[in-house]
Image (cartoon, rainbow, N blue to C red):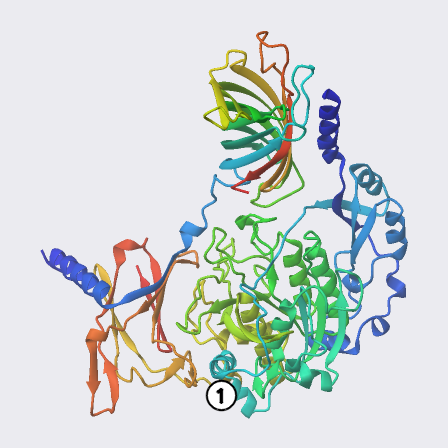
Amino acid sequence: MRNILTVCLIGLCSLSYGQSKVWVFFKDKPDVKAFNPHTFFDQKAIDRRVKHGVDIYDLTDVPVSENYIAQVETICTKSRATSRWFNALCCDATDGEVERIKALPFVSHVKTVSSIEKFAAGLSLHDVGGDFEPDEEQISLLQAQVQRMGASVFKDNNVDGKGVRIAIFDVGFKSYRTNPAFNHIRQDNRIIKTYNFVQDKEDVENGGTHGTFVMSCVGGIIDGQQMGLATGAEFLLARTETWTEFYSEEENWLAAAEWADKNGADVINSSLGYTFHRYFREDMDGETSLVARAANMAASKGILVVNSAGNEGNDHWKNIGTPADADSVLSIGGINPRTGIHTSFSSFGPTWDKRLKPNVTAYGHVIGSGPKGISGTQGTSFSGPLVAGFVACAMQTRPAYSNMKIFDDIQKSGDLYPYFDYAHGYGVPQANYFFAMPTKPRKTFEVDVDNTSIRIELDTVGWTDGLTAGNHKIDKNYIAWPDYVFYHVENTKGYLDKYFVVNPENSEDYIVDDLAGKGTKSSSPLVIMKSEYAKPFTLRVFYKGYVETVEIK
Amino acid sequence: MIKSICAISALLCVTTFTAAQVVELEQDVNQDTVISKFGKNRKHYISSYFGFGITPGQVETDSVQLKSGESTKITYGVYYKYKVAKPYSILASVNYGLSQFEFETADDVKYDRLNVNTVELEFANRFNFGKRGNTIGNYLEIGISGDYVFGTKRLTKQTIDDPSANHKTKKIELTGLTYINKPNYTAHARIGSNKFVVTADYRLSDLTNDDINFDLPPLTIGFRLDFGG
């Protein structure tokens, strides 16, 4: 019996001598002179660099020395990935092997990385659709999910993301070769390349259906109805996620980002994120995680990275994951089509260092297309691709703009802009912004400040007069959105202490105005007590497109 | 006076506002940015668990034999973890345990079972491996416990194959067994990964005293489900 115990204990203790996954960083790149970007990169990647003023001979683009890789591979157990951006090799190694690797003269340092788990930022992805013909209710939501961003405006101007190349990182794209939602894309051979970074092969069909749904929300068409806005874009599909080995996604993400860069991607859509499995909330500063740094690097190469905020809004984590925390990543929150405001699962911002996230929002409840048909699904996984499609269209309208200028414009096109909060960012981006000069919004409320309170009197005239969004008017045909009042309290450090969304409607106050021929409503004033906040502070209020800022001393 | 009127008016307005308007979303950012001291990988953590194990050994005597693989132990407990350093924590745990030893029986005896109820206090060292976020992570745990036996029961059920008897089975239940030692000491080793734990417990003291001529096997191997994992 004691022998059995001894064997058990030896087994337990052997854990401490197990392998770790490590990044081996190299001191230099000796092959720099042999690097020819014109043969290394896709022409579109060269064009993007030129457009963005990025040096095509940038040292970070030179591949990792094959000699260095070969030498490390003779020591480590298993080589996983390389990164030219970080001049590093990821591999599995024991403690003893790590010491031997560190002793190599060309190794700068070795960093142990932990096991990680991921979440695909989708919820309730039930591939239950039985066919590809949407019913009336599905058509209604399909139209709304794109029209909420102004699909008809893009359509009227023949903008569909043509010429823009979008890379999608996901768990798998089952049926992408046969799914009718992508007929138009396959017919034009616009799926440029695919790569499975999990299994090191080109096939991305296996792994799951999440990517298929995501792709449909970027640029699918079903039964003549747009599912996403970028129906004319080109696609790169990368499988970076896995269900069997939870611990490799971050380096897969990095490898896929470098691959996307090399193959000329203009936009990366990544509907995934990493949270408590590996990180603390205080790590969500846009600098700590590998994927956040990789995403920022991708942005520095001229790629606009769109990432879902995450689905942790109603659990203990609550806040955005990474790489949605990265400074140069356009982070996308989700709204509920029925209420028009933040949907409960969508992760909240800000970043730990109090930067605004999410940047903008889109529907978090959508109709997507999977292998078995179309069906309703939810998650910020789908808000992200809706905006990625929007980004492609915006890029088409502004071909000379840099990725970060487009980033900036997309924020400005938000229907809440210049108002923002950490649930909605600047709101839902609007296509109008890219075609019309903004008009000065009508004043929709009066702010009266006295010694103790701030009183906001809402102007009820034209209550039902359509929905105005920021400086732009939204087609309201399929969109139900009560006229909420948004307000936030900003402290002297420049970030929000509190923010609110208030529904001022009260059925008891409803008055029919026969002369106007429309219903109008009265509303009690909104009163904010000064004593509830540390002075001085800034109060910013949004109501029906009009924003007013009040400084309280 | 004017200030008071203003304040009352404002309060009335607030009341009116509350009645007429609905706050759909309210977020206090500062509350979300407080670093908690409590959590799976924070300074303090409390969790509960359920464990199940099998006592695979045999009694070292010819007079009785255990049924192979049928002796079990279930535990339910609560532990407190104090994180000393990133890879090292100390734990204190209290649990209730029920050990059940199944003896081989003659053909006419349906079962012969010994139940031992214990309350156990354990102190353990947890060594975590690999970097992790706010999760329990992967770990090796070594601990020692003292337990107190607060209830014992020997149960047998015998089939009576006698048509003249006025009953078909006979159950015998003996409690307060004097041959079971009340205090015991056990060493524990565990490998865990978040909520899933493999356990090995080895009793260091004899469970029985000199009133009977055998001791029960000391090793229990099993699993534990950490409800907080």
The residue shown at (59%, 79%) is: A131
The residue carrying mark 1 is A436
Residue B129 to residue A334: above or below: above
The image position of residue B99, as x and y in percent, is 55, 26
Which class describes the residues within 10 Å of circle 1: few (<14), some (14-19), or many (20+)?
A: few
* Along the line of sight, the residue nearer the viewer: B19 or A417: B19
The residue shown at (81%, 36%) is: A96
Residue B108, quarter of the rendered image: top right
Q: Quadrant of the C terminus of chain A?
A: bottom left
Q: Is residue B77 left or right of residue A297?
A: left
* Residue B127 visible, this angle: no
Residue A178 to residue A70: above or below: below
Residue A495, quarter of the rendered image: bottom left
The image position of residue A430, as x and y in percent, is 49, 80
State the residue lying farthest toward the front: B164
The image position of residue B57, as x and y in percent, is 68, 24
Q: Is residue A499 left or right of residue B46?
A: left
Number of dots carrying numbers: 1
* Along the line of sight, the residue nearer the viewer: A432 or A8: A8
Element class at badge 1:
loop
The amino acid sitting under disc 1 is: Ala
Residue B33 to residue A232: above or below: above
Q: Is residue A473 left or right of residue B209?
A: left
